[in-house]
Amino acid sequence: MGYHPRYLDSFLKTQHYLLHMDGPLPFDCRHYIAIMKLLKISEWSWSLAELVHAVVLLAHCHALASFVFGCGCEQEEGPVGRGLLKSSPPGNQSCRAPVQSLDSCMELDSLRERVQRIHVEMEGREEMRPLPDREEGEGVWDGNTDGEVTGAANLACYLQDPDFGYQDFARRDEEQTQVFRVQDYSWEDHGFSLVNRLYSDIGHLLDEKFRMVDGLQSSAMAKRQGCEPSVFKRGIWNYIHCMFGIRYDDYDYAEVNHLLERMLKVYIKTVTCYPEKTNPEMFDRFWKQFKHSEKVHVNLLILEARMQAELLYALQAITQYMVS
């Protein structure tokens, strides 16, 4: 984020406010929510203000995960699984020493094949049979000599629904498909006022972030596509919202295919919906003709678009509860 200092300042202010400033939730509860995989609201008795605070925290952390993995920050493997994050060194790719075993064209072809395989895997995900349950006692040996074994890296025991994950909106049954229309519930007209009413000032901070990322200047990618930066950014934003069933009646979605080449769309969908499938190679070697700051800009758009999409669904549900 340091490539875009104004946005970084806005992001840090929002995160600090969520975790450390006055708010409905106690401080220890905020950090607990931030690391949760699934929030069991039904078992907790919360006020609407506390619920909004929790929803914003969850959306913030979910979107941040996409940004972290999308920007090539990998987790080093340790004795109990993934550990500390290790980011790729900053700078323009052209300043780095070339990989000796492959020239740049072969690297790009190899990466494209990898991304295509991920895309095929995502398309066939719903058709795959679930893996059998682990046998009792199976796990990772942790050095105990009493015969007890533990699955230190297996988080399934902490999840209410371990198989829960993103489902391709376009592949759902038509009878179950319900489009979220922005003209019926939008951030500007509905979400902003609701969060500000129940959780003072957070609406202004979130709105500042949304506007800040939209105002960032990075025209190289748009120039390559032969369009204005604002048109290119809106195409990315609306494409991400479309993945979650959010539609804008005043937008021609045929433009997405003209503005975003297929490999770019596959990358965006992977980072948005399956961030755990990304790795530093995808960020480091893809789009070699662009600077790191421009690729980070795309990942910032992914972060904010995903966060707003999650907030729209949650805040609409809270609004419906309040008026029922």
Image: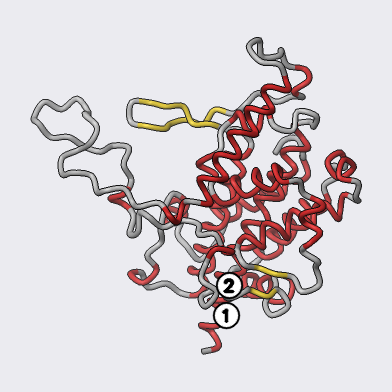
Side (left or right) of 38 relative to 313: left
Residue extending farthest to the bottom is 324
In the image, residue 21 sits, relative to residue 317, either above or below, namely above
Side (left or right) of 270 relative to 276: right
In the image, residue 291 sits, relative to residue 116, either above or below, namely above
Residue shown at 71%/16% (left/top)? 103
Of the residues shown, which amino acid type is indicated by label 1?
Thr
Q: Residues within 10 Å of mark 2 (few under 14, many from 20)?
A: many
The residue at which mark 1 appears reads as 319
Q: Position of residue 225 (x, y in %)?
A: 86, 45
Along the line of sight, the residue nearer the viewer: 40 or 44: 40
Side (left or right) of 30 relative to 228: left
Display coloring: secondary structure
In the image, residue 85 sits, relative to residue 304, either above or below, namely above
Q: How many circles with numbers are drawn on the protein?
A: 2
Q: Position of residue 234 (x, y in %)?
A: 79, 57
Q: Position of residue 79 (x, y in %)?
A: 33, 26
The residue at which mark 2 appears reads as 315
* Spatial separation of the CA atoms under disc 2 and disc 1: 6 Å
Image quarter (top left, top right, bottom left or bottom right) of the N terminus:
top right
Mark 2–mark 1 CB contact (< 8 Å): yes
Along the line of sight, the residue nearer the viewer: 279 or 65: 279
Residue shown at 38%/55% (left/top)? 163
Q: Position of residue 136 (x, y in %)?
A: 15, 44
Q: Secondary structure at mark 2?
A: helix
Q: Residues within 10 Å of mark 1 (few under 14, many from 20)?
A: some
Residue extending farthest to the left is 146
In the image, residue 66 sits, relative to residue 308, either above or below, namely above
Residue shown at 79%/62% (left/top)? 254
